[in-house]
Image: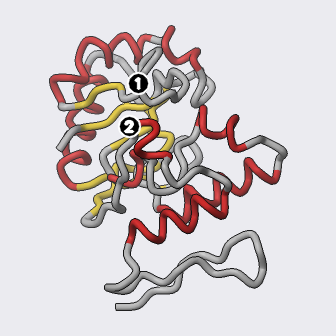
């Protein structure tokens, strides 16, 4: 199957098509070049290349009213973890689950358009192809009264509960302080492993 990909910021340029001869890795390399990210990003940082997940299940709506989805196993684990937290009067609210490469690219375009440099963006957002959200196993979490995607989350009851119990449900924090990937501390980002 041949599929045209999202157009780049340049009006006359379309990213490569995915064909047997030109696959996912090449598509991501094309996107990285267009964004100004070294194509060696993965090997330079140790960040894995994530393929887009399929067989996604809903985990409900996020704090913005958008449906969020995870792969089957992660969704089942999320629902169990969410219910267990609720039994202890802890509220876990999803902010973001699965993200496609195209959606991650839109995030990058918005940040670049707002004047952020590639270096600044790389500290807080993995480039398309390297976001753990593509795997369908990652979920960003907040709780009542906490601004989303801020370090303030670490001082909440929800974060303390996750530290104590998330492992029981197969979730762990991917980006702790001083993580090996060079991504800022993200106490809100939790993922299951394969």
Please identify the quadrant where the N terminus is shown: bottom left
Disc 2 residue crowd, few under 14, some 14–19, many 20+, Cα 10 Å: few
User: In the displayed image of the protein, which residue is found farthest to the bottom?
Assistant: 1
Q: Earlier in the sequence, mark 1 or mark 2?
A: 2
Give the SS element for disc 1: loop
Please report contact status of discs 1 and 2: CB closer than 8 Å, yes or no.
yes
Relative to residue 106, is residue 161 drawn left or right? left
Give the SS element for disc 2: loop
| Structural distance between the alpha carbons of marks 1 and 2 | 8 Å
**Occupied quadrant, residue 57:** bottom left
The residue sitting at 46% across, 21% down in the picture is 187
Q: Position of residue 113 (x, y in %)?
A: 81, 53
Q: Is 182 drawn above or below residue 64 in the view shown?
A: above
Q: Position of residue 161 (x, y in %)?
A: 32, 14
The residue sitting at 36% across, 29% down in the picture is 174
Q: Which residue is mark 1?
A: 180
Q: Which residue is mark 2?
A: 46
The image shows a total of numbered marks equal to 2
Q: Position of residue 80 (x, y in %)?
A: 20, 35
Q: Position of residue 172 (x, y in %)?
A: 28, 26
**Occupied quadrant, residue 117:** top right
Instruction: Please name whichever residue, 153 or 136, is drawn nearer the observer in this view of the structure.
Output: 136
Instruction: Please name whichever residue, 149 or 194, is drawn nearer the observer in this view of the structure.
Output: 194
Q: How is the image coloured?
A: secondary structure
Please identify the quadrant where the C terminus is shown: top left
The residue sitting at 77% across, 74% down in the picture is 10
The residue sitting at 73% across, 53% down in the picture is 110
Relative to residue 145, is residue 46 drawn left or right? left
Disc 1 residue crowd, few under 14, some 14–19, many 20+, Cα 10 Å: few
**Occupied quadrant, residue 45:** top left
């Amino acid at each position: 199957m041949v599929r045209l990909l999202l157009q780049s910021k340049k009006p006359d340029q379309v990213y490569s098509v995915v064909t047997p001869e030109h696959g996912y890795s090449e598509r991501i390399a094309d996107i990285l070049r267009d964004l100004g990210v070294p194509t060696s990003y993965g090997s330079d940082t140790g960040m894995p290349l994530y393929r887009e997940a399929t067989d996604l299940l809903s985990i409900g709506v996020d704090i913005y009213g958008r449906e969020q989805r995870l792969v089957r196993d992660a969704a089942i684990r999320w629902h169990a973890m969410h219910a267990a937290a609720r039994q202890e009067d802890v509220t876990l609210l999803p902010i973001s689950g699965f993200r496609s490469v195209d959606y991650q690219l839109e995030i990058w375009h918005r940040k670049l358009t707002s004047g952020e440099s590639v270096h600044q963006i790389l500290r807080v957002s993995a480039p398309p192809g390297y976001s753990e959200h593509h795997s369908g196993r990652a979920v960003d979490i907040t709780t009542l009264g906490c601004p989303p995607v801020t370090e303030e989350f670490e001082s909440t009851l929800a974060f303390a509960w996750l530290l104590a119990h998330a492992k029981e449900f197969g979730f762990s924090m991917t980006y702790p302080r001083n993580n090996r990937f060079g991504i800022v501390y993200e106490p809100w980002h939790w993922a299951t492993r394969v």
